[in-house]
Image (cartoon, grey):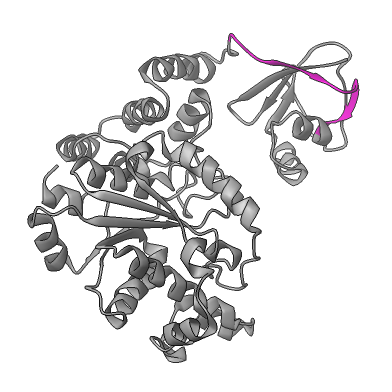
Amino acid sequence: MNIQTLLDRGTVDVIVREELEEKLKSGNKLNIKLGIDPSGADLHIGHMVVIKKLQEFLETGHNIQLIFGNFTGQIGDPTDKLNARPPKKQEELEKNAKKYLNQAGKILDTKNVQIFWNADWLEKLNFTDVVRLSQVFTVHQMLERDMYQERIKKNHPIFIHEFLYPLMQGYDSVELKSDLEIGGTDQTFNLLAGRTIQKAYGQKPQCVLTVPLLIGTDGKDKMGKSLDNYIGVDESPQEMFGKTMSIPDKLIVPYFELATNISLEEIDNIKKVLDEGQNPRDLKIRLAKEIVTLYHDKEAAKNAEKEFINIFSKKEIPEDIETKKMEKTKWNIVDLITEAGLTSSKSEARRIIEGGGVRVDEEKINSIEKEIDISEKRLLKVGKRKFLKVTGK
């Protein structure tokens, strides 16, 4: 991959581009850093946008530095506009990090990257070190961040420890002598903090490359599990395929660019045929197959396409539906679909039922008070893509 494509595909800002181009043209191996806050363990394809960019740099011969925030994660990156993030225990963070690596490994050659834990150096700093680090920034610079301005307007508290997060993330760059740090656009302040802190510690400042935040399947907000607009990395091929097919047409091109490996020339052609009036459904099928192939394989993508067509075009039921044995035979419908793993919570279950999205043996369930007898095998359908047979013991 040439330098121009490396810096242009799926990126928002390159700071400072001239500096980075000079570094890349030097022929030296660059230290390229990604800081990871392992507060959560389940990745979606929005998280993988930056991972895919790391793999591109790895394939061009550079050193990839994955830094897990088993220290900073205990504080929490203050990205929430209204509240401080609750702290996490180090044991939980390290457990999440291992799962993160397994999921990232679907598209990143993790055996050839360097893994670091920032507690290894941040725990060793004394109070004098922290004071010196704090002198690099002013309170005014911190308060310029949009999230803090929003909190001030809403009269929500801002805690002193939240100011320390970007300082510690920046110090990671000092410790590892990073040449380039990559992150989402929501991390721009923290990434630039690394440049400032490296200068203060006598190092050549790292460059910064930001990637966009992938919009979720609803076409409105950035992808996130809490909004139920995500495509999970560990989801089944059928679920991945179906969710991809549900995206608004306006997301077809961005998803091809950010979530697949097809060439920019092919993407330009996709834009052209869309403008010429080609059926977006045909392009979504190709997109869904590309995504499923990336995280599973071609055979899984082919089978997922077949099942999708059977279910949605021919209105058929999947051939191979799992049967799950439950602990009892009589259930409230909310409890049943939640306990069966078809929804992540009872509140989600209630929302889907009230929206008409739950069926038992093809009968629509209209009440969250509905009682279901599963002394004999029953077929559950939740949403458009989730099927499960259940029976009591």
Question: In percent of the image, x 34 and y 53: which residue is there?
Answer: 65
x and y, in percent, of residue 275 in the image: 22, 40
Residue 175 vertical placement versus 265 (above, below): below
Q: Is residue 118 rendered to the left or right of residue 366?
A: left
Q: In this image, 25 relative to 123: left or right?
A: left
Residue at coordinates 54% horizontally, 17% vertically from top-left? Answer: 311
The quarter holding residue 382 reads top right
What range of the chain is rendered magenta?
Answer: 319-333
- The verdict on residue 324 being magenta is yes
Please, is residue 90 above or below residue 55 in the view? below
Residue 12, image quadrant: bottom left
The answer to whether residue 211 of the structure is visible from this angle is no
* Residue 291 percent across, percent down from the top left: 38, 31
Residue 63 rendering spot, x and y as whole percentages: 26, 50
Residue 378 appears in the figure: yes
Q: Quadrant of the N terminus?
A: top left
Q: In this orientation, which residue lies closer to the viewer: 130 or 373?
A: 130
Is residue 206 magenta-colored?
Answer: no
Residue 180, placed above or below residue 276: below
